[in-house]
């Protein structure tokens, strides 16, 4: 029996049936990823397996550094062969890390390679992969289609032209929807100079001279309208902390003008302004029936030496902590609710010790007014939590504190065109949990009910929730 089979990660018979008969073949709605719309549109072949597999993958880079691999063979100018060899030497030692599972799921699903990758066979595996990449089945669009993906939501700056999203939508030969996501991180940048540079570009794009919060609201609303016209139905935010601090309009205007003039604001002032901008954006999202994603809890680019050498987003990030999360998250959602501006919201928690805080907080703001079940969602295990343990913790916590059956399921959060096996990974974990509950006598062995729940979590709930 091969390492990856229908029993992989599923330790009970009911779970295997749910996986094989229900979950395995369901289409994918990837509502949060970092794929590049231009690369999808241009549909160029990959030069080699490193281009597809190792380039930009900070998950793998972290593991390679832990294995004593020189930076030259990770992000440096070593040959493609040397880099692949270094990764093969690392992956065989990565047992217990999800990279070990993801690697072999991808090798089998996309390349038909059932061997376990290691230092003994790296060249053979590399050659098979490189030969496969010459075939038309391995272009970006083909990989997406082979993965049975219905919808892809990319991650895009409010200043993006979205030209490649529009070109893809005009191409009738490619049926997967590629939609933008509104990610306004620049608005919340603590560096005043970065904020003013953003405002200058925003003013130029919208023909609105931004001199006040009112002007800013008008200009950002125009960009949101543009994104909506191109099919966007989701926003995304990546704050380190979730806080809420109310203030008067006069106080807000003073702080905003300070930012606009490039003056550095204090932490307290920034919290006040960020709170007000979140409310402003939430009004726009609610008015257009968008979902708002909150990915919080990452502290990024911590190794200053390596940041100076390599730049940002290269694998030196960590889980953060936060005081008063419960009051901050409840306060922010309540402030939105009080002004009728709480949109459908997905809260992703990076620090798993806060799972119960997040799960019990979102329960405070559920209602039937949005026309969907569980409009406030506890997002799937994210980044450092898209492991088996992280996913199980999130699923069990949601089940205990809310309604697991209404969960909108998994996403890739990836830049790779072959990371869709992460949906398979999630589905195996989900089916194993529910199958175990059946085996333990915790829930009845009701095939019809359980099949419906699995189908909904893996596909239908997301389809209804976002309304793509």
Image (spheres, rainbow, N blue to C red):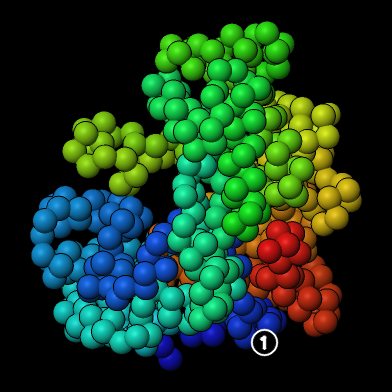
Q: Which residue is depicted at the point 54% across and 85% down?
A: 6
Residue at coordinates 77% horizontally, 43% vertically from top-left? 287
32 to the left or right of 326: left
Residue 191 is at least partly visible in this image: no
Image quadrant in which the N terminus is located: bottom left
Name the spot of residue 268 as percent of width and height, x first.
Answer: 56, 13
Classify mark 1: helix, strand or loop.
helix
Quadrant placement of the C terminus: bottom right
Q: Quadrant of residue 304?
A: top left
How many numbered marks does the figure carry? 1
Residue 155 position, x and y percent, is 50, 51
Q: Would residue 336 appear left or right of 115 to someone viewing this image?
A: right
* Residue beneath the point at 20% across and 68% down: 84
Q: Position of residue 207 (x, y in %)?
A: 53, 33
Give the side of residue 179 with respect to residue 113, left or right: right
Q: Residue at x 78, y 76 (%)?
A: 452
């Amino acid at each position: 029996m091969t390492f990856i089979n229908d029993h992989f990660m599923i330790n009970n018979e009911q779970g295997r049936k749910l996986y094989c008969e229900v979950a395995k073949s369901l289409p994918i709605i990837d509502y949060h990823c970092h794929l590049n719309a231009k690369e999808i549109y241009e549909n160029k072949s990959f030069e080699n397996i490193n281009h597809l597999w190792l380039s930009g993958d900070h998950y793998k880079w972290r593991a390679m550094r832990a294995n004593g691999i020189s930076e030259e063979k990770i992000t440096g100018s070593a040959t493609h062969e040397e880099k692949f060899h270094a990764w093969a030497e690392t992956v065989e030692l990565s047992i217990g890390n999800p990279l070990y599972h993801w690697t072999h799921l991808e090798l089998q699903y996309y390349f038909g390679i059932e061997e376990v990758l290691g230092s003994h066979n790296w060249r053979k595996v590399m050659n098979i992969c490189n030969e496969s990449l010459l075939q038309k089945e391995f272009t970006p669009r083909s990989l997406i289609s082979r993965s049975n993906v219905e919808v892809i939501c990319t991650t895009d700056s409010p200043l993006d032209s979205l030209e490649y999203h529009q070109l893809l939508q005009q191409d009738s030969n490619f049926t997967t929807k590629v939609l933008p996501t509104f990610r306004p991180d620049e608005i919340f940048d603590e560096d005043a100079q970065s904020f003013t540079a953003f405002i200058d570009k925003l003013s130029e794009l919208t023909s609105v001279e931004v001199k006040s919060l009112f002007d800013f609201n008008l200009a950002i609303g125009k960009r949101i309208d543009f994104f909506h016209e191109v099919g966007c139905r989701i926003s995304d935010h990546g704050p380190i902390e979730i806080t809420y601090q109310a203030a008067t309009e006069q106080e807000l205007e003073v702080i905003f003008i300070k930012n606009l003039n490039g003056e550095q604001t204090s932490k307290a002032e920034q919290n006040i302004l960020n709170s007000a901008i979140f409310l402003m954006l939430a009004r726009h999202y609610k008015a257009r029936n968008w979902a708002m994603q909150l990915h919080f809890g990452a502290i990024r680019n911590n190794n200053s030496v390596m940041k100076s050498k390599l730049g940002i987003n290269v694998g030196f990030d960590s889980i953060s902590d936060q005081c008063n999360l419960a009051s901050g998250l409840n306060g922010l959602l309540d402030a939105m609710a009080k002004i009728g501006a709480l949109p459908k919201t997905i809260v992703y928690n990076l620090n798993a010790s806060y799972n119960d805080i997040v799960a019990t907080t979102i329960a405070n703001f559920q209602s039937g007014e949005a026309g969907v079940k569980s409009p406030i969602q506890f997002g799937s295990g994210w980044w450092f939590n898209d492991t088996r343990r992280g996913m199980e913790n999130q699923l069990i916590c949601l089940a205990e504190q809310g309604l697991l059956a209404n969960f909108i399921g998994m996403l890739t959060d990836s830049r790779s065109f072959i990371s869709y096996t992460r949906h398979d990974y999630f589905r195996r974990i989900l089916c194993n949990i529910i199958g175990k509950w059946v085996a333990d006598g915790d829930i009845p062995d009701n095939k019809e009910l359980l099949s419906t729940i699995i189908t909904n979590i893996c596909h239908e709930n997301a389809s209804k929730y976002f309304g793509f």
